Amino acid sequence: MVATIRGPLVAGGNAIRGSRVGAGPMGEAERGETAPRNRIGFWCANGHESRIAFAADIEVPETWDCPRCGLPAGTDQQNPPPAPRTEPYKTHLAYVRERRSDEDGDALLEEALSRLRARRGA
């Protein structure tokens, strides 16, 4: 059995395809004058260069996030900012060991074991 298609074949509901509101060539006369801009180069520790456009009348930030690798980038190509140091994940036990010495831990363990033995009647 062969399926038949009835009615007109229409690709979409838009009569003017490939256009949108505001589409078309617009020149300076229609948009107005562009603000004066300065392009500033930023370099990250991996050597990536990013040229960012800033308005001419603003203060340029010291650092900018590199769009390629995410590291901080600075305006000095020879001396880019260092990569931030990431701290490894610490377990609860690691935090406890920072606060207590081994002797304190042994005393606490012995106290807990003696309470457990007393409860069990051993």
Image (cartoon, rainbow, N blue to C red):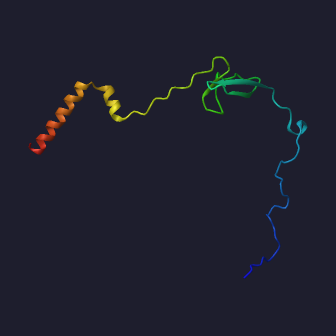
Front residue (pair 80, 64): 80
Say which residue appears at 25% left-offset and 25% top-offset.
102
Say which residue appears at 86% left-offset and 32% top-offset.
33
- Furthest residue to the left? 121
In the rendered image, residue 87, in percent from the top left (x then y), is placed at 46, 29
In the rendered image, residue 41, in percent from the top left (x then y), is placed at 72, 24
Front residue (pair 73, 47): 47
Quarter of the image for residue 104 reads top left
Quarter of the image for residue 15 reads bottom right
Front residue (pair 48, 70): 48
Quarter of the image for residue 79 reads top right
- Furthest residue to the front? 1
Q: Is residue 32 above or below residue 62?
A: below
In the rendered image, residue 93, in percent from the top left (x then y), is placed at 32, 33
| Horizontal relation, residue 20 to residue 103: left or right | right
In the rendered image, residue 36, in percent from the top left (x then y), is placed at 81, 26
Quadrant into which the C terminus falls: top left
Say which residue appears at 81% left-offset and 70% top-offset.
9
Front residue (pair 71, 14): 71
Quadrant into which the N terminus falls: bottom right
| Horizontal relation, residue 65 to residue 105: left or right | right
| Horizontal relation, residue 39 to residue 43: left or right | right
Q: Is residue 18 above or below residue 43?
A: below
- Furthest residue to the bottom? 1
Number of dots carrying numbers: 0
